[in-house]
Image (cartoon, rainbow, N blue to C red):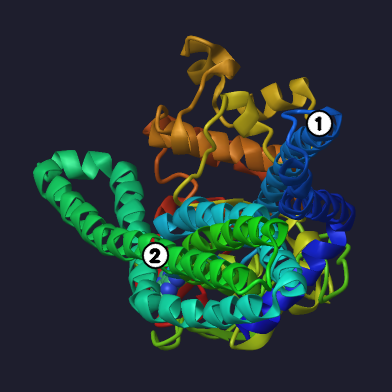
Amino acid sequence: MFDKLRVYYGLKVFQTYKWSFVIVVSLMVSETAVGLSLPYLIGQQSQAFLDEVTILNDNHLKYLFLWIGLFAGQAALRFFSSYNVNLVGARLMADFSCRLYDHIQVLPIQYFQENKRGDVLSMLTNDLAVVSFFVSSVLTNLIPNILVLIGASILMYMIEPTIALLICFLVPLIYVILKFVSRGMQPISQQLVQRQADTLAQASENIGAISLIKAFNKEADESSKFRQRTNEVLALRAKQFRLQALLSPLIQFLASICILIVVIMSVLKFNAGSLGIPDLITMLLYGIVFTRPLGSLAGLYGQLQQVIGASARLLHVYHLESEPRDSGGIAAQIKDGDIVFNKVSFGFAQRGEILKDVSFHLKPQQNMLIYGQNGGGKTTLLHLIMRFYEPVSGEIIIDGFNVQHTTIRSLRSAIGLVSQDVLLLNGTIFENLTYGLANPIADEVYKAASQAGLDNIIMRLPNGYDTQVGEGGIKLSGGQRQRIALARALLLKPRILLLDEPTSMLDEQARLSFKEEFHGLFARFTVIMISHDPTLSNVADVVYKLENGELNRQ
Ligand SMILES: Nc1ncnc2c1ncn2[C@@H]1O[C@H](COP(=O)(O)OP(=O)(O)OP(=O)(O)O)[C@@H](O)[C@H]1O
């Protein structure tokens, strides 16, 4: 599967960057051609220096200027190709990381519940960095080095076939040795990628739960866990470095033997009279040119082992099916907010049934209160309406549209959700209030904030609406966050409003005004509200109890 995917993405990427690739490959081919022509020219034209005894005569100077010119040309080509290659590599990776991020965002919510945040972060940082480094190395090393190996072999073959064939025979032998020495590398690399992800996951989780750690005096324990994980990474790195460090000198050693073979064979041929001095010089220069790329290819082979693990993880995620946001259904026109649950059942994998044949009909602009025991499935019911999950059986119909057959975008844009755990983004209060609005109108924002009882709170803050709320809204109290979430939902003007424990964080006064103003605030919406506050039943049109998975009208 991965191979197919690799080929598929490889072709897709090639399509997008075809002209950049053409330019880069042309520059590399030109540079290699100049680099390969130099030993030949120097070798063959050296005859002039042997024949004409006068030092640096016009003829010599002509050749010298030609060689210096070619060296300069090669350097210039190398500059352009190196700059362009790295640029293409960086663009490729920037593009891939954006595609990956886009994809991760549209993965179903289960993915985020089943995977650690640190794993995802590690993919976007470590794994991408490994692949990115490899891609630039392949572009900068693999292509030119292979061109040099092929070109030098052909040119050596043209001068002296026996030596060239012998050298070419040694190359596969070098590859076999390389493969044997680095066979332990791949498992180490895979473990390393996983351990690094675990370390990042722990750090990310701990920072998110720092107040818990402090409250339980667990700083030292968490530090020692982190140190242990870091030491595991270090131990794996040490193994990896040892193997990598072994590869390079080993290949260098084998390459030196190749050079020795060229030298000895060329000298023997020269002594036997079958090789002239120009050919001898040419062969020796090609011997050096030929063996140089072997070292960098060995390094690349080592990197390849690391990249296999990282790219397997990336491609695995890339291959996961995303939510069909704009496809897989019709764009529902939800104008009234008429909600029908028809024998809806649901359960999480291996957790048994949570909702059993739940049925109700909520007419437009009606409001409904659901109460019931903790863990009874109330939030899950709201999440089914949002299509965070799909029912196991039964159907949810909104304004005549079966939600399973509508596009997710059209469905969610008609619904406002105020969650139990209010999530705010790291930005100002104003930015959080207007999140999700294309063109926020300031007066409407102030009105909604006032309706949610935020006026006094915001006025007392040092920068008013421009006050930064911190990550997740950490600089605000629970009640303040809940009011912002309410105001945000009101501003969105959805047809349906789902309120998950909307008053749980509010103070006495705020709860009272929430109840008093309920009908004024929410009259335009169809509202499903979850609460453990029995007094809210006074404002609800219909009250239901969820017990043992069954929803019954009270
Ligand atoms: N992602 C999940 N994977 C597996 N089980 C889950 C998942 N989310 C919730 N559950 C389980 O489903 C059950 C219903 O959870 P839900 O959050 O809907 O309850 P609730 O009625 O809203 O509870 P509360 O009143 O405490 O907020 C719980 O037993 C919970 O452990």
Q: Where does the image place residue 220, in percent across and percent down from the top left?
A: 10, 43
For residue 253, the mark is 2
Indicate left or right for 286 with 192 as reference.
right
Q: Is the distance from the Cβ of mark 2 to the nearest ligand 1 atom less than 8 Å?
A: no
Q: Which mark is residue 276?
A: none
Pointer 1: what residue? 65
| In this picture, residue 418 sits left or right of residue 363 | left
> On screen, 9 above or below 93?
below
Name the foreground residue: 553 vs 135: 135
- On screen, residue 78 versus residue 417, left or right, reads right
Does the Cβ of the disc 1 residue fall within 8 Å of ligand 1? no
| Disc 1 secondary structure class | helix
Which residue is at 76% across, 65% downward? 325
Q: Is residue 524 visible?
A: no
Decide: few, some or many residues near mark 2? Use Cα within 10 Å; few <14, some 14-19, many ≥20. few
Residue at screen point 67% across, 37% down: 435
Q: Position of residue 401 (x, y in %)?
A: 83, 74
Amino acid found under the numbered disc labelled 2: Phe
Which is nearer the N-term, disc 2 or disc 1?
A: 1
Q: Is residue 432 visible?
A: yes
- Quarter location, residue 197: bottom left
Which quarter shows the N terminus? bottom right
> Disc 1 residue type?
Phe
**How many residues crowd mark 1 within 10 Å: few (<14), some (14–19), many (20+)?**
few
Instruction: Give me the residue at 68% from left, 50% from top.
Output: 89
Q: Residue at x 73, y 41 (%)?
A: 49
